[in-house]
Image (cartoon, coloured by chain):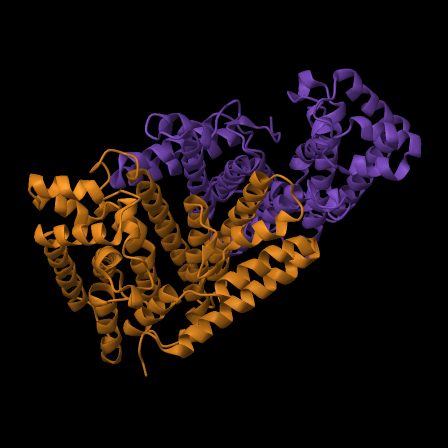
Chain colours: A orange, B purple
Amino acid sequence: MNTLTKTEYVQAVDEVIREFLSRQQTSARYASPYYEDLWKEIERLISSGGKRFRPRLSILAYRAFGGKDVEMILPAAAAQELLHLSLLVHDDIIDRDYLRYGVENVAGAYKMHYKELVHSPEDVGHYANMAALLAGDLLLSGAYLLAAESKVPATHIVAIQKLFGQAIFEVAGGELLDTEAAFRAPNSITSQTVALYKTASYTFILPLMVGALLADLSEEKWEYVKTFGRNLGVAFQLRDDILGIFGDEQLTGKSTIGDIREGKRTQMIEQFYNLANEQQITEFNRYFANTHVTAEQAEIVRNLLVESGARAATEQTIEGYELEARAALKELPIEQACMEELEELIEIAVRRNN
Amino acid sequence: MNTLTKTEYVQAVDEVIREFLSRQQTSARYASPYYEDLWKEIERLISSGGKRFRPRLSILAYRAFGGKDVEMILPAAAAQELLHLSLLVHDDIIDRDYLRYGVENVAGAYKMHYKELVHSPEDVGHYANMAALLAGDLLLSGAYLLAAESKVPATHIVAIQKLFGQAIFEVAGGELLDTEAAFRAPNSITSQTVALYKTASYTFILPLMVGALLADLSEEKWEYVKTFGRNLGVAFQLRDDILGIFGDEQLTGKSTIGDIREGKRTQMIEQFYNLANEQQITEFNRYFANTHVTAEQAEIVRNLLVESGARAATEQTIEGYELEARAALKELPIEQACMEELEELIEIAVRRNN
């Protein structure tokens, strides 16, 4: 029952988010019903999906490091979901996506609202993205604001704010590098840097550190928390890359042909170019990053990744990260009752199939 | 010498900003020179212009309410310039502008960088705006982060964070409403709401409240600070609207035909539609919001605003706000040495000609 997926925690986090958004919505109504609409869209979107992974991880870390009052840290935990949504909303602008969690995202919803009001379709899209831009700003600011409402000592709040600032610094850098990797020279931006900055930073290190800090874990142990999070985070990303090409679409819910068509340069692909022979590379390049690739041709790409040893090499790299994470974990004082959930977390990061 | 424009304060604020940005730049370099480039562009932009009005106003309020250690509050003051730049950078995305302070803004600079790397011109613009989007996010987060570095008690920092959150909530709402006003039914969004939310909130109320809070002004006086800031802020915006049509282009540096062509629905325009007769309205509508308007036709618009009494009515409204501001100021304990600067501030808000 005491597992990472414990539904009471998810519900408690959702309650904090709902209460926060409802207050913002009420304040927005004083300005204008049109401003209230923006907050309604934010609430609709956050209610439509998301696993609350980061808040749950913060709560787990807090309990694992001896914290007893989960209630008290809920705002700081929930704030990370606002940050996450902020990044998704802005990410969707960058990727020109109008769907998220299987429903319209903020820009998608505003496209429908504005269609009736704005004549030029180009302007409809532009203004819809503007609403999404503002929504993302509000969520980013909202993350700091909600964290500031935690019923913990002010010194802790300030320390958490600094962790937020560091994580945002890293994830924005990761986002920039990930985008630029698409058109800069191969290898000028490594997939490992992107994994570290874009994924490990705010999905693992931040939630773990927030929990550690609020549980008053002694400062000399923080480096181990970061090492644990960094290694799990990069392993998580590598597993994601493998699932993106070799996953079971039924389990992941994602197409395994998208990354091949897009030519996403993951670490596995970098490994391929290191390990493959000339003939394999020639064949690979015929299909990789080709938007018209067929299911059969995608299967050729998969076979080449296996035959060259790139897939196995990536699996080995993941194993290396797992060992590093486990070594760091051994240096940390963990509540015995939380060990099972931490094992589950490691499994999610390194061996999940969905 | 002890005036609002006191150059030592501007220099001290700039020093704090420069030091902060230089630290971020160094950290970014560890990730990638491409990430460092983004921070270089941010620093280039902030060094190219801006009057540091908000930091200066915070310092003035702090001193006026009895604060003695300006050095201590510099990060909280300077943080507001980061917030301001964040809003400008995102605002420029919304307005599709690539220039700011007479130089390329972040998107403008990245257009040049990416031109060499990305083939489709549409994609160049898109990715350039993505870099600007991330820069704005980093500056928004940076504002919270820099404020958190103030050498003031942690409880004060948390209180300031909440003021930041409130101001961002208001200014984002103002931005949304201002943009939607262009295509929603006339009068469904009033110019006063926009002025209050978009300008007064973070340009006047926030800096004044940050100064008041850090000077430990007693809480029962805060409402007067807000009233002072709100009235000055709206007066400032109304003066801006008048200068946008009647200003001396030599002094303001802004064209006085742009707002007429764009059909910007300021309070003066709302007044015009209330006060003018049918014939005046017919003539006005012929030229107002007409992108091809000539200098002579713009002069007809100006005459109609005068003849209808709209301009005088707006001047009277400004006077009303000034009286409200002065009444609130009387309720506040002000250091005598700062009265001259506060008078100067009121003059800037209500009677400036540039």
Q: In which quarter of the image is the C terminus of chain A?
A: bottom left
Which residue occupies the extreme bottom position in the image?
A: A1
Observer-nearest of A242 and A136: A242
Q: In the image, residue B127 lies at what x, y percent? A: 41, 36
Residue at 77 percent across and 29 percent down: it is B288
Q: Answer above or below: position of A63 versus A273.
A: below
Can residue B164 be seen? yes
Q: Quadrant of residue B112?
A: top left
Q: In the image, residue A129 lies at what x, y percent? A: 53, 45
Q: Quadrant of residue A42?
A: bottom right
Q: Quadrant of residue A84?
A: bottom left
Observer-nearest of A19 and B108: B108
Does residue A38 appear left or right of residue B41 in this picture? right
Does residue A200 appear left or right of residue B112 in this picture? left
Can residue A214 be seen? no
Does residue A321 appear left or right of residue B339 in this picture? left
Q: In the image, residue B57 lies at what x, y percent? A: 60, 38
Q: In the image, residue A13 lies at what x, y percent? A: 45, 70
Q: Answer above or below: position of B217 versus A15.
A: above
Residue at 36 percent across and 27 percent down: it is B113
Residue at 34 percent across and 55 percent down: it is A202
Does residue B106 appear left or right of residue B30 in this picture? right
Observer-nearest of A83 and A37: A37
Q: In which quarter of the image is the N terminus of chain A?
A: bottom left
